[in-house]
Structure formats: C-alpha cells, structure tokens
Image (cartoon, rainbow, N blue to C red):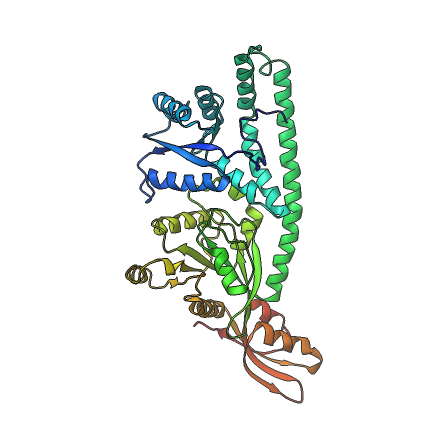
Amino acid sequence: MSTNPKRFVPHEVTREVADRAVLVGVDRGRSDGWSVSDDLEELGRLADTAGAVVVGTVTQRLDRPNPRTFIGKGKAEEIADLVRESDATLVVFDDDLSPSQQSNIETLIPEIKVLDRTALILDIFALHAKSREGRLQVELAQMEYLLPRLRGLWRHFGQAAAASGGSLGIGTRGPGETQLETDRRLARQRIQDLRRELQHVASNRDTQRRERARSGVFRVALVGYTNAGKSTLLNALTDAGVLVEDRLFATLDATTRRLELPEGREITLTDTVGFINKLPHGLVEAFKSTLDEVREAELLLHVVDASHSLARAQIAAVNEVLGEIQAADRPQVLVFNKCDLISNDELDRMRAASPNALFVSGATGQGLEGLLDRIAVEASRAEETVEVLVPYTRGELVRLAHERARIITEEHTAEGTHLIFTASPGVAAQFAGLVVLKADVIDD
C-alpha cells in the first residue's frame, strides 16, 4: 500500500534514531479527577514506551475542539515554532483527531509526523505484541484506524509532490484516485482476512476456556490499570515468569497459570492486558477475544497501584472499560498493590476508605497470604455441598473430588466410597446419577 512515510504506518516498530516529541493537550475542564497535566504526564510515559524523547509540551483551554484543526490556528503556529526550536520530529495529541483534522494540522506543520493518542497506543501495542493472536489483533486495529485516513494520506502526498516542484494533480486525481480506491479495497480485504484469522484463533481459545469451565476449576482474572503490577502479582503467586517492566503495556497477551490455594483447591489465575484512561474503542474491539477471559472469569482481582496519585481515578477508568466489555457484573475484589511504596499513615487512610479491599505488595510478598485466603472465600461462595456414593469402579471421580473439591467426610463402604464435599457447580455436575443428597448453596 502506497502511503506517505511521514504518516502512520502499520507495524512501524523499529527506529534507528529516537523521535523527538512535542506533546499537545487540550484542557476542557474535566470533572473525572484527571487534569490536563495528568493527561500529558501519562502521554509522556506512553511516548517513552514507544521510544520517543519528549522535548516539549503545549496546552490550550478549549470548550470544544476546533472542527478543522482541533486546536486554534494561533496555537498551531505556536506548536510549529516549538517544533523548529526543539528540532522535534513528532507531534502527539493526547486526544483523537479526525482524519481531516490530522491532515489540516500536517499542512500547518509540514514535514513533521503527527499522531493522536490512538495511533501512539497502537504503535506501542505493535511493539509489544508477541503471540500470533496479539499481532493479528493489533494489525486489525491499525488497519481499521488507517482506512478512513487514506484520502488524507493521498492528499498529503500530492501536496508534498507540489512543494517539490511536481504537479499538484499527481496522486490526487486521475491515477491517484484510482490508486486510492485500490488501496481502500486492499485495506478492506486485509481487514476481512484478519477478522477471519482472529475468528479461527478465538475458536481455539474458546475451546480451551470451555475445557477449563468443564473441569470445574475456579477462574480468577487479574484486571487493572496498566503498570499496576498485575504481572508482578502473577509471578509472586505462581512463579509464572511473566515479563515485568516499569513501562505501560509491557504485557499484552493473556497468560493463565494454575495456582493451588492453601486449602488444597486448584484454581486458574489469568493476567490480562492493562487498561488505560481514554482507551481507544478500536483496541477494545480488536482485543475482544482476549478480554473474554475477563468476561468469563468467576472472580476479578482489580489491581490498583496504591502509590499512584491518581489511584482513585484509575479505578474509575478501569470500571468504565469493564462496563464497556460487559464485565461490570463480575464479582470483584479490590487489591491495592505496591503498598511497600507508601507510608504507614497513608496505608491506614486507604484501609479506612476501602475497608473491604486488600493491601499487598507483589514485590515483597506483603499481604499475599491474606489475598489467597480471600480468593478461597470467594471461590466457596457459589459452591454446592454434595453427598455421593462413588462405586469403586469409578475411582477417577474420587480423584476428581480430591483435586477439585473440598472434602468434608470420606468413608469406604461395601458399596463404594461415601463422600460429602463442597464443589463448584461444574464439578458437582460430573457426579450426576451418584448424588445421595445435594444440599443448599453455602454462603460464607
């Protein structure tokens, strides 16, 4: 596909020289706890994760974005001056730009790459996607982002040609229009191909999930804001060996590990992609199959960076995404992580504000025993108490009860093994036909 190399290109993940970035934020008087300086600080971390060096920031107070250039013309000229003074190679807007806004800004600031928040996050995802499914998901989101921008790409190409002495019509009419339609068809075809491939990969993941559901193993998912320490917790609890970095979106692919609770019960614990404020909707859609792990979990551990100044705002941002993926109704336990980084007085204040939350440190192990105990309590809430007589010819069911249930009594009789145990509905269902008594659900 022919595009201007100065514009966004799928999977542009290698850079010989680090980009020098100017960040642009608009203050619209938000009331959700995030200030424009907070937004730009996070955007700066995203830029750093993508490999850029931040050399300047620009802010503007607007009630509503300018429909042509998002920011005012005077502010655009200020950005152009800062770009020249700082020798910047990249301008990143903290908000999403329409294709026409991006094209108009590039006209005002020629020869400089202009990205919005979504394009920057997509670039980071392309950089960090390791699995086949992750790479497909990222490419799909990139292609869907790029498709409506193709006309602007061709217009920008034509302007560049005119500036270098070529005809303004080359690439903008006649053959250019034909090439534009060709590119659109190629993009749409690639999107269809990616969706088909993802459906195939997702069907395999669905099969794995169904097998775990049939096994009756209690399923727990770690969710939370990016860089809250979910991977550190997974490693501390299961020795998973998952990559841990102090960068946003260091882990994209869902990782599931088995974990044995102190009482002997085995569960699965899944680490999922971190959420972020203003997470692009296209990414939520592209990562739908991965996020099924969250939707189908029986318990969510909502991990929060206790040391972050915007911890409460981050909780709200995560809950918003959970609502968007229809997972807001999942049982949830709030887990404040990185408690080794805050003072005892601050920890006491947080305990008073969130009496039902847990306070841990994946790095030091603080509070992990209490976390395991809480998981065990939550896993017991939906269990059934079952009394069965298992014939000696069905020894595999006795093993299943020991592996997947909590044994209350066990007695060997002439007819078989007499068991009373508590188990999840999935495990209990595998003893159908052998049930002597099925008691009420236990509520701890």
For residue 298, say whether it is visible: no
Is residue 137 something that shows in the picture? yes
**Most extreme residue toward the right, as rendered?**
393
* Residue 365 versus residue 187 in the image, above or below: below
Could you tell me which quadrant the N terminus lies in? top right
Query: Picture quarter containing residue 128?
Result: top right
Q: Position of residue 297 (x, y in %)?
A: 52, 58
Horizontal side of residue 417 vs 109, given as left or right: right
Position above or below: 122 against 349: above
Q: Residue 351: x and y, percent?
A: 32, 62
Q: Is residue 240 above or below residue 285?
A: below
Residue at 57%, 37% in the rendered image: 14
* Location of the C terminus (image quadrant): bottom left
x and y percentages locating residue 221 in the rendered image? 51, 58
Residue 287 in which image quadrant? top right
Q: Looking at this view, name the residue that lies furthest to the bottom.
A: 414
Residue at x-position 42% and y-position 44%: 277
Residue 200 image position (x, y, % from top left):
67, 47
